[in-house]
Image: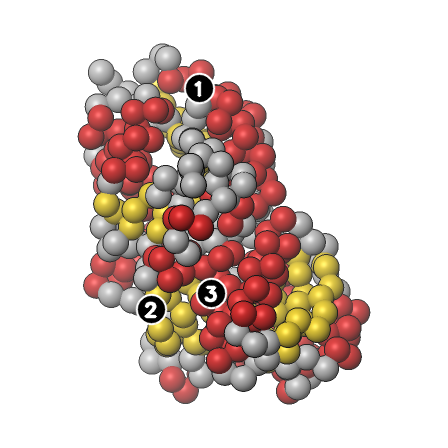
Amino acid sequence: MKRSIGIRAIPWLLFASLTATAAHADGNKVVIGDIDDMSGVYADVIGPGGIEAAKMAIEDFGGSGLTMVLGGSNTGVSIAMGTIAKEKKTPFFAVGAAGASLTGKDCNAYMMHYGYDTTALGNGTATTMVKQGGKSWFFLTADYAFGTQLQEAAAKVVEANGGKVIGAVRVPLSTSDFSSYLLQAQNSGAQVLGLANAGNDFTNSIKAAGEFGIAKTMKPAALLAFISDIHSLGLQAAQGLYLTTGWYWDLNDKTRAFAKRYFEKTKREPTMNQAAYYSATMTYLNAVKAVNSTDADKVMAQLHKMKIDDMFTSDGKIRADGLLEHEMYIMQVKKPSESKYPWDYYRLVQSMTGEQAFGKLSESTCPLLTH
């Protein structure tokens, strides 16, 4: 059976993508729907670069296609997308949205959380910061589901390790002026400024903190940062930051080989999420090939059986709650004098197993599971 392929980038139009996907399936045509931020606060995290990574996976697979949806960077949108994916029985890979509830209370049988989550970010960065002496925290938090869940995850780790949360302030998405929020943080007397935000909001808050001299009295904690953020900030401003990531372009031979190809197309090194777009697309294609069908239930069953060993992870598995469990890495941003070549930004501090990062499956609150 011959299938044609289309990649349709429809940022934020959930029904349009899912409707198009479902409609084409019966006619032996397949569509990869991508729902993400193409020009806003998270555009550099996935955006057009994620589309390019998905195209690379399809080309590498030989031009075969599938019926599925990829996206997006916003946890609130992904929660809504998951609901419609369940209704339409369309597999949905949530890549970039961090909220752990996607495989907790908001999980469903057609959604996979691929890359990282707020639990892993807290277990990595917050634990490291507390061990470095950062016992008292003030959070600057993105005012929606992602920020709330990230703050909660980090605060839980801080308190479990003997630290204390002194305060927090919620900041609207795409804020242009962080001065009043940073002043509250500075006046709190906390040792650590927990940045529970991402994308341009993260880089702008770091820049503003530097301008206010806050870094002299507080240590910024990058609870979610990408290599695109570090590239935008520059090593002079970002040096010393600890962050948690599931992927780095210069980690090993496989990551470097993929990054070289990606750079030739985009002139930028891929973020964790852009690499995850490639991996998720290829993983799904391999599942479709294995069952010789795009039937959602058959493909989902196959995905839960597979071991994922590719350029993104060497020990990945999609758990019963939909989470891709895989190794995660705690990194520290290098000083300018330590960087030896372009995009040489991270020093590996520690590796975490999937269970160390994400927690045990038995601890999941996904209603699909019977405890």
Q: Is residue 48 left or right of residue 264?
A: right
The answer to whether residue 232 is visible is no
In front of the other: 275 or 245:
245
Lateral position of residue 257 relative to residue 158, left or right = left
Which of the labelled discs sits on residue 155, or is there none?
none
Evaluate if marks 1 and 2 touch, with contact meaning CB atoms under 8 Å apart: no
Residue 297 point in image, percent of width and height: 34, 24
Of badges 2 and 3, nearer the viewer stands: 3
Q: Decide: is 232 above or below 274.
A: below
Residue found 77% across the figure and 79% down from its top = 187
For marks 3 and 1, give the CA distance.
38 Å
At a point 40% along the width and 60% down the height, the residue shown is 357
Number of callouts: 3
Closer to the observer: label 1 or label 2? Answer: 2
Secondary structure beneath label 2: strand
Q: Amino acid at mark 2?
A: Ser
Among the 4 quarters of the image, the one containing residue 307: top left
Residue annotated with mark 3:
123
Residue hosting label 2: 351
The answer to whether 304 is drawn above or below residue 324 in the figure is above
Q: Earlier in the sequence, mark 1 or mark 2?
A: 1
- Residue sticking out furthest to the top: 27
x, y percentage for residue 128? 47, 75
Report how far apart the C-alphas of labels 2 and 3 lie in the structure.
12 Å
Amino acid found under the numbered disc labelled 3: Asn
Q: Which one is earlier in the sequence, the residue at label 3 or at label 1?
A: 1
| Residue 327 can be seen, yes or no | yes
Q: Quadrant of the N terminus?
A: top left
Identify the residue shown where x is 49% and y is 36%. 367
Per the image, the residue denoted by label 1 is 22
**Considering the numbered disc 3 on the image, is that residue within a helix, a strand or a loop?**
helix
